[in-house]
Image (tube, rainbow, N blue to C red):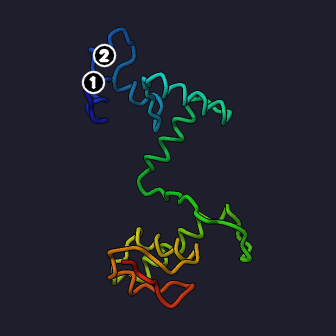
Amino acid sequence: MTFGPDRLRDLLMSPRMRTGCDIPATAARRAYPGVMSLTVHLPGELAAALEAEAARRGQSADQVAADLLAERLPLPGARRKLAFAAVGSSSSGHNAADADDMLAERIAGLVTTYASLRLGGTDASVVTLAERLGTTRIATLNHRHFTVVRPRHADAFELLP
């Protein structure tokens, strides 16, 4: 049976579930403001994989689980990191550590420049990746956007099919 977060919280805080607990439900909710405590039962293979990853990182399983959740469930308004692609040596003075910011800046710039076209982040990411890889060939059915957008490294994209 699956419960949404609100229903699960209600069940966990119900008097029936807190039998033997001397902390009132309202106090339990405020015990650690801004922190959620969670117990998760993992299948054996997944638990072993989590423990192995924690050992590899030199962290607790709790910290690894929190990091993995943070990657998958970013905070509202938080800026997500882009996994950099094809970052090699550069004459610009930038290195791989700067890649996320450089790519995000270019993507945001394209979305702003082509706002009237309603170019989205996905198409802007494709343009940015094509520029980074030095290719002009893009396989897409979205000719509307890609015939208008001008890449930095060429006059136009060659659209396939």
Residue at left 36%, top 8%? Answer: 20
Q: Quadrant of the N terminus?
A: top left
On screen, 117 above or below 67?
below
Mark number displayed over residue 17 = 2
- Where disc 1 sits, the SS reads helix
Asked if labels 2 and 1 touch by Cβ distance under 8 angstroms, the answer is yes
Q: Is residue 75 left or right of residue 142?
A: right
Q: Residue at x 66, y 34 (%)?
A: 56
**Camera-side residue of 108 and 159:** 159
Q: Earlier in the sequence, mark 1 or mark 2?
A: 1
Q: Secondary structure at mark 2?
A: loop
Residue 62 in the figure: left or right of residue 143: right
- Where residue 58 sits: x, y (%)? 68, 33
Q: Is 106 displayed left or right of 111 in the figure?
A: right
Amino acid type at circle 1 is Leu
**What residue type is disc 2 on?**
Met
Displayed quadrant of residue 97: bottom right
> What residue would you read off at disc 1?
11
Nearer the observer, 80 or 77 = 80
Indicate which disc residue 105 carries: none
Count of numbered badges drawn on the protein: 2
Q: Residue at x 35, y 19 (%)?
A: 24
